[in-house]
Image (cartoon, rainbow, N blue to C red):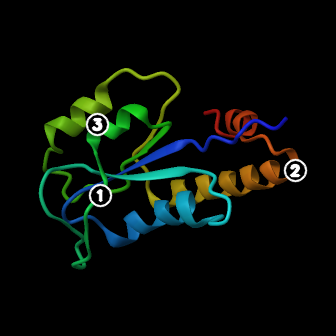
Amino acid sequence: MKQPVVAPVVALVVFNQFSSFHFSVPCIIFKDIMPEQPLFDLRVCAGEVGELKSNAGLQITPEYDVTELRSADIVIVPFWRNPAERPPQPLLDELRKPTTGVHRLWACVWELMFWLMRACFLARKLQRTGNLSLTFKSVFQM
């Protein structure tokens, strides 16, 4: 009997004045690549309290906050609005907590394109084998 496939949890952290482009790339890679058979459980997390608008005026209300990073298999912080500004302390505290088996990405778009290629490989393996957990471990080892 086939085991149910459990999609790895991807936490995408978003802030006020986020880049719409840098936010959209992980959404495409980890949510929209195979809509009929999700490979990942994407969870958008508010990286700070308050209104979250992009630098182009797009406003979002994430379902999750930074505490969701504790249960994530992959954490992505794709953008920070100002290198001279310190990120919120609750986020820094969550990112600094020791974890086992969690991949944390402070990623640029090119790195995410690399992950897209890996996700495509994973999708092909899943179609052939029906086993995501073994494939995830073998494909996403860093």
Residue 28 placement (x, y as % from top left): 53, 66
User: Which residue lies under the disc numbered 3?
Assistant: 67
| Three-letter amino acid code of the residue under disc 2 | Arg
User: How many marks overall?
Assistant: 3
Residue sitting at the far front: 1
Q: Which residue appears at 20% of the width and 66% of the height?
A: 17
| The label number, if any, that marks residue 128 in the structure image | 2
Q: CA distance from mark 1 to mark 3?
A: 13 Å
| Three-letter amino acid code of the residue under disc 3 | Thr
Residue 73 placement (x, y as % from top left): 50, 36
Sequence-wise, which precedes: disc 3 or disc 2? Answer: 3
Which element is circle 3 on? helix
* Local crowd size for mark 1, using a 10 Å CA cut-off: few (<14), some (14–19), many (≥20): some
Which element is circle 1 on? loop
Q: Which residue appears at 44% of the width and 56% of the height?
A: 108
Q: CA distance from mark 3 to mark 2?
A: 36 Å
Residue 91 placement (x, y as % from top left): 23, 39
* Local crowd size for mark 2, using a 10 Å CA cut-off: few (<14), some (14–19), many (≥20): few
Residue 81 as seen in the image, left or right of residue 126: left
Which element is circle 2 on? helix
User: Which residue lies under the disc numbered 1?
Assistant: 62
Sequence-wise, which precedes: disc 1 or disc 3? Answer: 1
